[in-house]
Image (cartoon, rainbow, N blue to C red):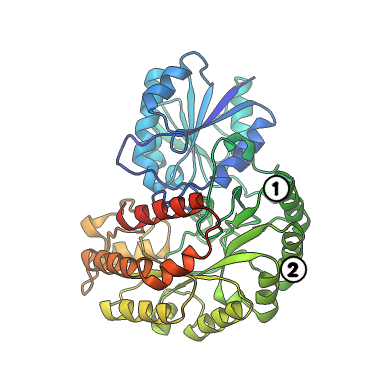
């Protein structure tokens, strides 16, 4: 039987670990990579499976490789995002040097886009896009020592040439997937400062988003799916849903396992009132506190009421700007008035609101529009405000626009942490100006007496407070 090890490698290139479930920031607080754990759940049904997290259970690469000398896996799998690409390529090289008979398989958006750079030798394989079916077919063929070179959805190096097969069709039945293999990371305590309850985990009930925001890659799985699908179809992939019944079954399972908090990682959690009601009913039944991401246009009065009645402790609303002109330019599909309406409804039913602001999403942005958006956001007195800088992610319409107009510093995309760095230079707004606006705005907001007092009242233990304080330090200062 094949021995498979999922590896979250230590940082050997750079200084800060990448957060691999969202994929565009450095780690602020530990979050389980639910997408990788979903893949691991498929693998462990057929093969001996281990999960080694060198970030949350710290160990050096040398220590890891030394241990592998006596218990070497046949295949090492890494979930690679843009911010981790250079690190993971170097780790792959080191793995092959120390364990030359092992295979390395790279999943995720970083590997999907930078696949040729990831082909460090002929025992490295990249799985593109949605990974489960492709990886399982690949492992089966390796296990049977049969030819895997023509299976859909992979790329590899052979005789010095890069090869890429045709796109793998997307999964049609997400209910057929096993629940994520959370037991493989039971040695790590995960926390979400917005929920302030443990044990905490994440969960996904759908894949992808139908909306056309020019800059957006909401999660690392979405990004991987979109990169692959757009390559062949020139449009976003369709949304895939799990049934409310299967979602309810997993929530009840998590409750029986003792989980007290869930962060839903769906690009958009709220699709309609009927589906949301079915999921909220079981959340209320179990008493689990939870949070999600949603569009302001999805917040109706019945939705807001059911969120308030079912233990929802935050809704992340991606508003980006309070300028209707900018919102229209970036194809956000919402208006300033819809933002106010959604917030009023959520506050009416005592649902905490987190507003996400994105600096620099269009050439219409100026220092004044940024300051005005932040001023309006603060005036609403929501529970939390998150400000980041847009990045021209390859595969998005914004990347194409930025390349055509020469907005990218040094002429080409390089992965950046959107929480503190910018590679954009508009003629009237530089990367340094945006970074300064971001830092000073965050500093004033997170160190304001109102924010500190509100957060202090919600902590349930000294441990929760110290972990939140550590996360805030990392967010502000790295």
Q: Residue at x 49, y 25 (%)?
A: 103
Give the residue at mark 1.
254
Q: Can you tell which quarter of the image residue 74 is in? A: top right
Disc 2 secondary structure class: helix
**Tag nearer the camera, 1 or 2:** 1
- Cα distance in 3D space between marks 1 and 2: 19 Å
Asked whether, in this view, residue 370 is left or right of residue 29, the answer is left
Relative to 326, is 167 above or below? above
N-terminal-most mark, 1 or 2: 1
Asked whether, in this view, residue 296 is left or right of residue 300, the answer is left
Give the residue at mark 2.
277
Q: Which residue appears farthest toward the top when viewing the image?
A: 70
Residue 222 numbered mark, or none = none
Disc 1 secondary structure class: helix
Relative to 11, is 25 above or below? below
Q: Is residue 91 visible?
A: yes
Viewport quadrant of the N terminus:
top right
Asked whether, in this view, residue 141 is left or right of residue 447, the answer is right
């Amino acid at each position: 039987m094949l021995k498979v090890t999922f590896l979250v490698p230590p940082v050997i290139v750079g200084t800060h670990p990448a957060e691999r479930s969202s994929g565009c920031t450095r780690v602020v607080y530990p979050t389980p990579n639910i997408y990788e754990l979903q893949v691991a759940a498929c693998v462990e049904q057929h093969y001996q499976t281990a999960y080694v997290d060198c970030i949350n259970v710290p160990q050096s690469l040398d220590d890891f490789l030394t241990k592998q000398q006596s218990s070497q896996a046949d295949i090492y799998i890494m979930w690679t995002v843009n911010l981790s690409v250079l690190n993971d390529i170097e780790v792959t090289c080191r793995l092959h040097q120390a364990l030359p008979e092992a295979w390395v398989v790279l999943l995720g958006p970083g590997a999907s886009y930078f696949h040729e750079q990831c082909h460090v030798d002929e025992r490295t394989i990249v799985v593109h896009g949605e990974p489960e079916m492709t990886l399982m077919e690949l492992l089966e063929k390796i296990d049977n020592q049969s030819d895997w070179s023509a299976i859909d959805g992979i790329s590899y190096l052979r005789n010095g040439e890069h090869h890429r097969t045709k796109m793998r069709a997307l999964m049609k039945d997400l209910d057929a997937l096993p629940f994520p293999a959370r037991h493989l990371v039971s040695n790590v305590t995960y926390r979400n400062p917005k929920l302030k309850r443990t044990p905490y985990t994440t969960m996904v009930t759908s894949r992808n988003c139908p909306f056309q925001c020019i800059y957006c890659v909401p999660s690392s799985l979405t990004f991987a799916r979109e990169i692959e699908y757009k390559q062949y179809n020139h449009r976003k992939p369709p949304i895939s849903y799990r049934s409310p019944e299967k979602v309810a079954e997993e929530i009840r399972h998590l409750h029986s396992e003792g989980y007290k908090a869930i962060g839903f990682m769906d690009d958009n959690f709220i699709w309609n009132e009927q589906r949301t009601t079915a999921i909220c009913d079981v959340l209320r039944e179990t008493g689990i506190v939870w949070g999600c991401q949603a569009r302001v246009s999805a917040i109706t009065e019945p939705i807001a009421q059911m969120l308030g009645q079912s233990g929802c402790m935050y809704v992340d609303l991606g508003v980006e700007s309070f300028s209707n002109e900018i919102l229209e330019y970036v194809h956000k599909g919402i208006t300033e008035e819809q933002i106010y309406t959604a917030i009023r409804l959520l506050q009416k039913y005592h649902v905490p609101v987190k507003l996400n602001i994105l600096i620099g999403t269009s050439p219409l942005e100026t220092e004044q529009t940024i300051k005005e958006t932040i001023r309006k956001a603060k005036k609403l007195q929501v529970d939390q405000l998150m400000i980041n800088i847009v990045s021209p992610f390859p595969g998005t319409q914004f990347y194409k626009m930025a390349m055509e107009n020469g907005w990218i510093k040094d002429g080409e995309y390089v992965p950046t942490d959107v929480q503190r760095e910018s590679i954009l230079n508009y003629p009237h707004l530089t990367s340094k100006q945006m970074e300064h606006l971001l830092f000073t705005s965050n500093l004033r907001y997170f160190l304001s007496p109102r924010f500190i007092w509100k957060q202090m009242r919600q902590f349930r233990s000294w441990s929760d407070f110290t972990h939140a304080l550590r996360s805030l330090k990392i967010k502000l200062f790295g």
